Amino acid sequence: MADPARAAKLAQRIKVVVAEALGRKVKDPRLEGITVTDARVTNDLQHATIYYTVFGDQVVQADAAKGLEKAKGVLRQEVGRNITVRLTPTLEFVADQIPVNASNLEELLRAAKKRDAEVAALAASAKHAGDADPYKSDIPEDVEIDEDDFDEEDDDLLDEGIDEDSNK
């Protein structure tokens, strides 16, 4: 097992080598619009997965995948020449889904922003369901409470600082 840091450095180097080789060595017109976005190498340095994007419709993307499969040997040969490992890793090309996921995320954010605006518009015209002050007292303001109305048990509880409700 190789050090994960070494595998990460090797993956970055492979990414650069493959991107340069696609521009210099491979003359397939199907591969002109390819952008290499990432590369990952297993810890044993035997297999490399290279992520790429292609701008265009499904036909262009399918043609690019076929072109990469056809050019895999040339690209692996270039990787073997430009890296310093005992065995050249096998290459696997995977279409990167980041642009698709990003557009889906943007659509979700647009929909959430629209719903937030609708809720804000409803909240601006909303009124309370009950009274403005839900904690109104049932006792009119002009009524005074006499301490003489309490019986002796209530006075004892008040002197001790204990609520009558807490004893229940």
Image (spheres, helix red, strand yellow):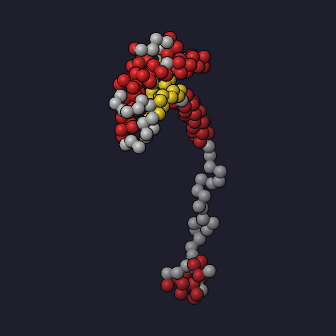
Quadrant that contains the C terminus: bottom right
Compared to residue 137, the image places residue 149 above or below, namely below
- Which residue is at the front of the view, 105 or 160? 105
Residue at horizontal 36%, vertical 40%? 5
Q: Residue 136: percent from the left, percent from the top?
A: 60, 61
Quadrant of residue 152 within the rendered picture: bottom right
Quadrant of residue 9 within the rendered picture: top left
12 with respect to 145 (left or right): left
Q: Residue 29: percent from the left, percent from the top?
A: 50, 11
User: In the displayed image of the protein, which residue is found farthest to the bottom?
Assistant: 152
Compared to residue 135, the image places residue 15 above or below, namely above
Q: Is residue 110 visible?
A: no
User: In the displayed image of the protein, which residue is found farthest to the right?
Assistant: 129
User: In the displayed image of the protein, which residue is found farthest to the front?
Assistant: 86
- Which residue is at the front of the view, 79 or 9? 79
Q: Is residue 67 visible?
A: yes
Residue at horizontal 55%, vertical 79%? 163
44 with respect to 94 (left or right): left
Residue at horizontal 65%, vertical 51%? 129
Instruction: Tell me how many marks there are.
Output: 0
Residue at horizontal 63%, vertical 66%? 138
Quadrant of residue 154 within the rendered picture: bottom right
Quadrant that contains the N terminus: top left
Q: Residue 145: percent from the left, percent from the top?
A: 57, 75
Q: Residue 59: percent from the left, percent from the top?
A: 60, 16
106 with respect to 25 (left or right): right
- Which residue is at the front of the view, 40 or 89? 89
